[in-house]
Amino acid sequence: MIRSLKYPDNQPIKKDIEMAHSALEKIRSKWHLDKKNGWVGGVCAGLANFFHTDPAYVRVALVIGALFLWKLVLGVYVIAWILLNDQQD
C-alpha cells in the first residue's frame, strides 16, 4: 500500500532505472578494464589508463587505501570488476 502511494504508475521507477543505466554506460565508455596490463582483474590498470599514469601508482594507492578502509576498497574493486567491460583496442 505504501508503494502504491509513492509510485502509482511505476513511472518514477522506470526513470530511475533508465538514469542508472545511462550513468553506467557513460562510465563504461570512459573507463575499461585492462586485463593485458592488469594483475588481478585489470581494474587498477584500467584506472591508470584513464588517468594516463603508471598502474603501479594506482596499485600503491589501492593498497594504502585498503590498509584503512579494506571493506570499502574491496567492495568498490569487485563492483568495478563486475560492471566494467574489457578494454577495446
Image (tube, grey):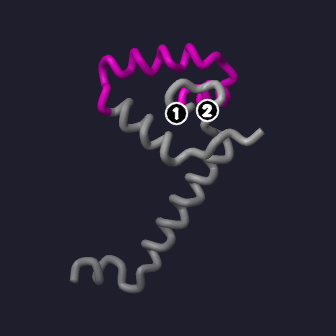
Nearest to N terminus: mark 2 or mark 1: 2
Residue drawn at the location 36% of the way across and 79% of the way down: 7
> Which numbered disc covers residue 35?
2
Q: Quadrant of residue 73?
A: top left
Image height of 63 relative to 14, above or below: above
Residue 26 coordinates in the image, percent (x, y): 63, 50
The magenta stretch spans residue 57? yes
Few, some or many residues within 10 Å of mark 2 (<14, 14–19, 20+): some
Few, some or many residues within 10 Å of mark 1 (<14, 14–19, 20+): some
Residue closest to the far left: 1
Three-letter amino acid code at the position of disc 2: Lys
Q: What element carries label 1?
A: loop
Image height of 49 relative to 3, above or below: above
Q: In this view, does 1 lie to the left or right of 77?
A: left
Residue drawn at the location 51% of the way across and 48% of the way down: 83
Q: Is mark 2 on a helix, strand or loop?
A: loop
Q: In this view, does 48 lie to the left or right of 15?
A: right
Q: Name the residue under label 1.
A: 41
Q: Nearer the viewer, residue 55 or 65?
A: 55
